[in-house]
Amino acid sequence: MMGSKEHTVSAIRRNDNSIEYFYVERKKNPKLQKLKKIPFVRGIIALIESASNGSQHLQFAGERYGVNPGEEEIEEKKEGSKLEMWLGVAAVGVISFIFGKFLFTLIPVFLAQLFHTWLPGKTAQILLESCFKLILLISYIYIVSLTPLVKRVFQYHGSEHKVINCFENGLPLTVENVQAQSRLHYRCGSSFMLFTVFVGMFIYFLVPTDPFWLRIVDRILLIPVVLGVAFEVLQATNACRNVPVLRYLGYPGLWLQLLTTKEPKDDQVEVAIASFNKLLEVEKDPSKIPGKAV
């Protein structure tokens, strides 16, 4: 999946070796556009849009995975009902993101509390909580990456980064040139996940950890704050990636991408190149988007 400010395009490889595309045009809401200009708030809006948009593309790919072209279930639906279906998928994606964030925020709190007798201090509890959060995040990513399906997704993730790096380096988008690029990229959402751990740790030092019920309430209420600040940190590390010393600030996020991306095969790189080229095509001429576009 490749995206710009105006469109997102997904390319998938079908069983007959053909490539099929799915398009989503980014709808501009005047109120949201204003919110996107506000630091710390814009990160929340971007995350919600990303979860909503990404779930639609995953739904499209999932519906065609393992299905031969022409064998899809064809149903005559009105455009309204089709739109309702995709809105439902988008809503599920956003809810799933929020639910996952709650789990990764609160589980470490309860784990740290188990050691409160031995490590009762505020500093110790926050450091312990952050360690548990980091361990939980890395362990989860590592375990799911062992499954064949997720490994394949991570390979495509790596191919996306390679294509972007190749394009930003001004090289022709050939399989050979793309494969020579790094599968890591500063703007990746994987880096953002790691930044939420460290940003959260510093923010938690500003609020009380006792009593325990207040600590839980604080963690829940601070979720938007942590996400907003982490987004700004991600933006800052990307802006500083060419500064000799400051570029190292983004390295922890790049290290996490060693888990969330895998080296892709040539045919996977071909799909990523096709997706990016199609995105450039519709950016120049939106009329080339098929009528089935959402």
Image: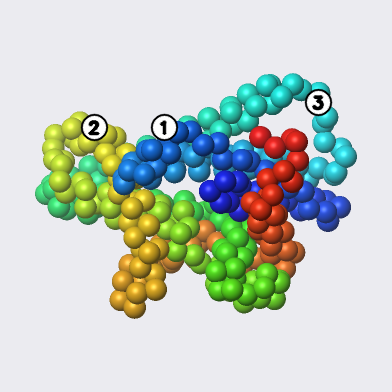
**Could you classify mark 1 by the number of other residues whose Cα lies within 10 Å: few (under 14), some (14-19), or many (20 or more)?**
few
| Mark 2 Cα shell of 10 Å, populated few (<14), some (14-19), many (≥20) | few
Q: Name the residue rendered at 42%, 58% in the picture.
A: 191
Q: Position of residue 169 (x, y in %)?
A: 55, 74
User: Seen in the image, is 109 located left or right of residue 84?
Assistant: left
Residue that appears at 20% across and 31% down: 213
- Which residue occupies the foreground of this view, 219 or 168? 168
Dot 2: element: helix
Q: Which mark is residue 31?
A: 1
Residue type marked 3: Glu
Determine which residue is flagged by label 2. Answer: 217
Query: Please, is residue 267 above or below residue 70 in the view?
Result: below
- Tags 1 and 3 touching, CB below 8 Å: no
For label 3, the residue is: 75
Q: Who's the residue at 46% across and 53% down the image?
A: 189
Task: Give the residue type at disc 2.
Answer: Val
**Marks 2 and 3, the one that precedes in the sequence:** 3
Report the front residue among 152 and 185. Answer: 185
